[in-house]
Image (cartoon, rainbow, N blue to C red):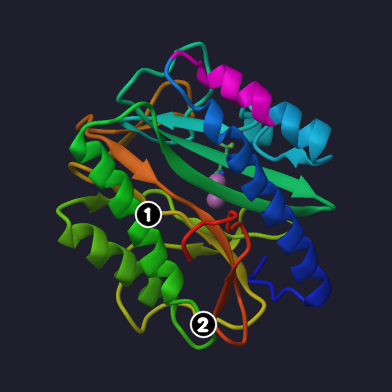
Amino acid sequence: MSVTIKNAQEQQLLREAGRLAAAVLTMIEPQVRAGVTTEELNDRCHEFIVGDLKATPAPLNYKGFPKSICTSVNHVVCHGIPGPKKLRKGDIINVDVTVIKEGFHGDTSRMFYVGEPPVLARRLCEVAHRAMLEGIRQVRPGARLGDLGHAIQTFAEAQGFSVVREYCGHGIGREFHEEPQVLHYGTPGTGLTLQAGMAFTIEPMVNAGRPEVRLLPDGWTVVTKDHSLSAQWEHTVLVTNRGYEVLTARNGEAP
Ligand code: MF3
Ligand code: CO
Ligand code: CO
């Protein structure tokens, strides 16, 4: 299937799905503390999504994924499976939430600090966040996907960090992962030309060390090959006539 342009009604449904996904991260924030297990975070998110939001957690049983959210701690890059391990002071963790509401997906993730992580860990999280924002800032009709990738890559690398190549952002709508692939590196003026009504995620994974990753034998957990820390933030973005709309923005979040 090729890149779809969402009509006004579809945009409204995506907007609602995005709003609900963002609400899950807002809900879970105070619970991300030392001593809590990632499984407990999963269970709270699951109950909130199903019970309060009357929505569906998209990851659960997606290609066999066993849980309702992804939790990626420290050197885990993405797709960490919630489990019995307790968070410890100084950890950094990405919580990635995708919900389905009335057939449409909203996909967002952010980093949390457990206690006060070391300065490098905090700087990595901040740089990954700003790298995502640099990508979002490029979004407007007529821009090219390579413009986004280039903005993300140059920002992250200028800070001495590296960008993961094996995983990318994606179109989103009735399907979890649609075309196009949104690379977090690239060359300006290349790639797909954006049009109003396109919707996709921007979700750079930034490593403190080398960019290479390894898949663990569980078939899901992606870690840095050199065991360096990794950070990721994700928003679902709609291309508008004026530029962009961040469908998963949280209340009070800086633009
Ligand atoms: N939410 C992830 C993304 O941003 C995908 C998770 S797939 C899962 O695309 F199966 F691991 F949940
Ligand atoms: Co995504
Ligand atoms: Co996601």
> Where residue 50 sits in the image (x, y, percent)?
79, 33
SS at badge 2: loop
Q: Quadrant of residue 93?
A: top left
Q: Amino acid at mark 2?
A: Arg
Is residue 40 a member of the stretch shown in magenta? yes
Disc 1 from disc 2: Cα separation: 20 Å
Highlighted magenta segment, given as a residue range: 35-45
Q: Residue at x 35, y 42 (%)?
A: 231
Please give the name of the residue rendered at 64% of the width and 59% of the height, measured from the top-left corner.
Answer: 172
Horizontal side of residue 90 vs 246, given as left or right: left
In the rendered structure, find residue 210 and report the number of the disc placed on it: none
Is the C-beta of the residue carrying label 2 under 8 Å from the nearest atom of ligand 2?
no
Residue 245 position (above or below residue 203): below
In the displayed structure, does residue 113 sit left or right of residue 42? left
Q: Earlier in the sequence, mark 1 or mark 2?
A: 1
Q: Can residue 207 be seen here?
A: no
Q: Circle 2: is it few (<14), some (14-19), or many (20+) Cα within 10 Å? A: many
Which residue in the structure is indicated by mark 1? 129
Q: Residue at x 73, y 32 (%)?
A: 48
Q: Secondary structure at mark 1?
A: helix
Where is residue 113, by image quadrant?
A: top left
Residue matched to label 2? 140
Q: Quadrant of residue 134?
A: bottom left
Which residue is at the front of the view, 228 or 92? 92
In the depicted structure, whether residue 147 falls above or below residue 49: below
Q: Is residue 70 shown above or below 147?
A: above
124 relative to 110 in the view: left or right: left
Q: Amino acid at mark 1?
A: His
